[in-house]
Image: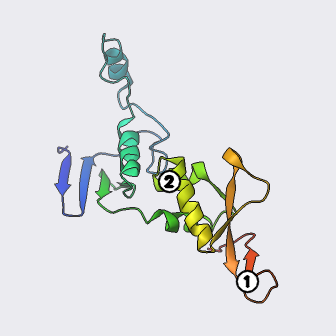
């Protein structure tokens, strides 16, 4: 078994750990699930007066949250035959407008809280400004009947053939794979 490898490039950092992901852990569920490789050791350490592992399994979650706060791409986790590779790219997320519009290609509506999670914007008022900017550009409209904290936004598409000023509500997009 070799040591953990940390490779630093101009646009990314790669951390490679030999061995496989433990138990039922996969790159898809690694942030939601926990699995101790040595349960006895974890139990023993947790009995110390100030246990070092009280937040066991939270390191990757903290890294993912920090990347979102800095509005950087999520780290990639790649499971290889003999190792696990985490790639942390130094690439910004798409701008908030693009992220909202991309989300609405698959979903009918978007709320402020969902948009904040997707974009890494923590301030509800800043997110509201993004929605209003998209509204001014004729890309979004508020979902009728939903106000205040329950408000949601939906896309509108340009269409010059109807009688309502060229705007038509966009009901749903379905993409086939």
Q: Residue at x 43, y 66 (%)?
A: 94
Residue 123 location (% of width, % of height): 49, 47
Q: Earlier in the sequence, mark 2 or mark 1?
A: 2
The part of the image, by quadrant, that contains residue 89 is bottom left
Give the alpha-carbon distance from disc 2 to disc 1, as whole Å: 29 Å
Residue where numbered disc 2 is placed = 126
Total tally of numbered discs in the picture: 2
Compared to 170, does 100 lie above or below? above
**Local SS, label 1:** loop
Compared to 23, does 39 lie above or below? above
The part of the image, by quadrant, that contains residue 43 is top left
**Category of crowding for the residue at label 1, using alpha-carbon neighbours closer than 10 angstroms: few (below 14), some (14–19), many (at least 20):** few
State the mark number for residue 29: none
Look at the numbered discs 2 and 1 and tell me whether their residues touch, using CB distance below 8 Å.
Answer: no
Residue where numbered disc 1 is placed = 166
Residue 101 location (% of width, % of height): 57, 68
Q: Nearer the viewer, residue 144 or 2?
A: 144
Q: Nearer the viewer, residue 22 or 72?
A: 72
């Amino acid at each position: 078994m070799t040591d953990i490898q940390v490779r630093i490039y101009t646009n990314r950092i790669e951390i490679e750990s030999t061995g496989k992901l433990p138990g039922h852990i996969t790159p898809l569920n690694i942030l939601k699930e926990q699995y101790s490789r040595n349960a006895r050791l974890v139990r023993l350490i947790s009995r110390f007066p100030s246990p070092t592992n009280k937040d066991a399994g939270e390191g990757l979650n903290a890294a993912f949250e920090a990347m979102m706060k800095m509005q950087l791409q999520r780290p990639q986790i790649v499971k290889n035959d003999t190792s696990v590779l985490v790639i942390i790219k130094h690439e910004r997320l798409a701008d908030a407008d693009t992220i909202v519009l991309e989300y609405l290609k698959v979903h009918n509506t978007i709320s402020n809280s969902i948009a904040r999670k997707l974009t890494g914007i923590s301030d509800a008022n800043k997110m509201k400004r993004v929605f209003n900017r998209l509204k001014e550009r004729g890309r979004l409209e508020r979902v009728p009947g939903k106000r205040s904290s329950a408000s949601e936004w939906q896309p509108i598409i340009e269409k010059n053939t109807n009688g309502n000023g060229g705007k038509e509500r966009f009901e749903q997009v379905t993409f086939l794979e």
